[in-house]
Amino acid sequence: MVARPEQRRVARRSIPRRLQDPGPELRLVRRVDLNPAGVRIEQPEALNEGLLCFINLPPGLGWLRLTGREGWTKFHKAERTLEGEQHVYYPSAA
């Protein structure tokens, strides 16, 4: 293979992952319950307190999109399936 000369005028630097702004991310969660004060969800990873959340409700509840802030997240349990996969559950409230 022939090496090609570098054509960039300025060197590029990678931004460490811990300093990157992830921007909006879609995460699948399971709604556990919903009441006028908030929503409780369950997901496979911990969420940061204060995270802005959008919860889309199904058609039976009127196609609403609720907005809230993450109140708390804690580890609940971990299970191993018969196939050997591990599933972790973190309940949260917003």
Image (spheres, rainbow, N blue to C red):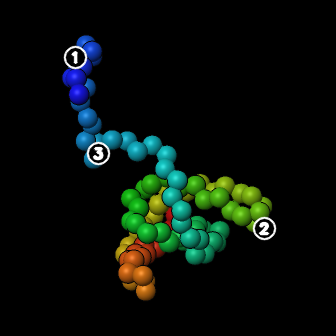
Residue ID for mark 2: 60
Q: Residue furthest bottom?
A: 82
Tell me the CA gap for discs 3 and 1.
29 Å
> From what the image shows, is residue 70 above or below residue 34?
above
Nearer the N terminus, badge 2 or badge 3?
Answer: 3
Res 60 quadrant in image: bottom right
For mark 3, give the secondary structure.
Answer: helix
Q: Residue furthest front?
A: 1
Residue at 38% across, 59% down: 48
For mark 2, give the secondary structure.
Answer: helix
Residue ID for mark 3: 17
Question: Which one is closest to the eye, mark 3 or mark 1?
Answer: 1
Tell me the CA gap for discs 2 and 1.
60 Å
Q: Amino acid at mark 3?
A: Arg
Question: Which one is closest to the eye, mark 2 or mark 1?
Answer: 1
> From what the image shows, is residue 21 above or below residue 40?
above
Residue ID for mark 1: 5
Q: Amino acid at mark 1?
A: Pro
How packed mark 2 is, by other alpha carbons closer than 10 Å (few <14, some 14-19, many 20 or more), is few
Residue at 47% across, 69% down: 43
Nearer the N terminus, badge 3 or badge 1?
Answer: 1
For the question of whether residue 67 can be seen, the reply is yes
The residue lying toward the viewer, choosing from 35 and 11, is: 11
Give coordinates of residue 26: x percent, y percent. 52, 53
